[in-house]
Image (tube, rainbow, N blue to C red):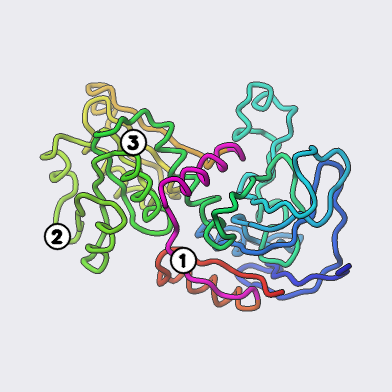
Amino acid sequence: MKTMYKAFQASRPGVLELVERQRPVPASGEVLLEVEACGICGADAADINVARDVPRVPGHEVVGRIIELGANVPAMWKLGSRVGVGRLGGHCNECGMCRQGMFQLCRNQQSVGSNCDGGYAEMMLARATGLVAIPEALNSVDAAPLLCAGLATFNAMRKSGALAGDLVAIQGIGGLGHLALQYARKMGFKVVAVGRGDDIAEEVKVLGAHRYINTNMEDPVQVLQAMGGAQLILTTITDSAAASKLATALAPQGKFLVVGVGREPLTLSPGFLVSGERVVKGSITGTPFDSERTLDFSVLADVRPLIETMPLEDAPAAFDRMASGQVKFRMVLTMGR
């Protein structure tokens, strides 16, 4: 039995340090995973760059196999099961939100890679309530980004109330947006991609867009309004000013869904919202059940992330490449055996 494992931890702001750690023992309700793949997400920057007293292993798009079971783990999880863990690392089953069945809003939820160790490592502890079953048809590298970027976009649109044939605009064609385009097309929406530059014009059409608006050349609000307005706008960007402007392209009773977390507030006219009965709503990633729905739909509809891979040993370089914006469209760490 392997008694030590390698991990990259954020020991001081902005620095990923390779360390060897003692094999952890799962507590009651926990499992120990042997990690096979871990996606690198833009949100990892907040975990890596923050000052903290305790070193933290980042990474919240984790796929691995169960190699040890703690006490009181449900019988559905067995040694050798291939499972995933996303940002929401497992609900408590005790708080008011959990008692209402809203597990994604659990007040005692672990935030993987932030307040508990994540997947930039060969091993990782995980709460059983946060585990996601991985379909055999999905390899671990493809599955990893779907546990965050895929879940965030698919789940938001699935619950949005938009119907097949509705005009849906996706703002931001990056790690989240390139998956959102695929899901939107497979859901039967009329899909408009809103991005910058000509370099992705053909790519977004292959991914599923019926129309691409290059904001360097066209005013997206004018274009969408000329098309009758968007019934749904999904914004994946962190530029709150640009997101707020695009919201004015909503049709009456349209919905503006926010999955990109910007630092600045959104600015929208109350009159615009009231006069057209328009809705602005945030959408968190989702529960493990939502994740499994995302993975199943991805297999059914042949949706896959476009990825680059690097070995765990190159985690700092992989993170830097992601942070530079050069990756098309997701970076995934793989673990050597």
Sort mark 3 into few (<14), some (14-19) or many (20+) by Cα contacts within 10 Å: many
**Which residue is drawn at the image coordinates 14% and 34% (left, top)?**
228
**Which residue is drawn at the image coordinates 55% and 55% (left, top)?**
138
**Which residue is drawn at the image coordinates 68% and 39% (left, top)?**
109
State the residue in front, 105 or 15: 105
Mark 2 vs mark 1, foreground winner is: 1
Q: Amino acid at mark 1?
A: Ile
**Dot 3: element:** strand
Q: Which residue is mark 3?
A: 256
Answer yes or no: do the residues labelled 2 and 3 have beta carbons within 8 Å? Answer: no
Q: Amino acid at mark 2?
A: Met
Residue 59 x %, y %: 62, 60
Q: Which residue is mark 2?
A: 217
**Dot 2: element:** loop
Q: Which residue is mark 1?
A: 307
Mark 2 and mark 3 lie on one chain; the one further toward the N terminus is 2
Q: Is residue 129 above or below residue 182?
A: above
**Dot 1: element:** strand
Mark 2 and mark 1 lie on one chain; the one further toward the N terminus is 2
For residue 306, side relative to residue 12 (left or right): left
Q: Distance of mark 2 from mark 1, alpha carbons?
A: 28 Å
Q: Amino acid at mark 3?
A: Phe
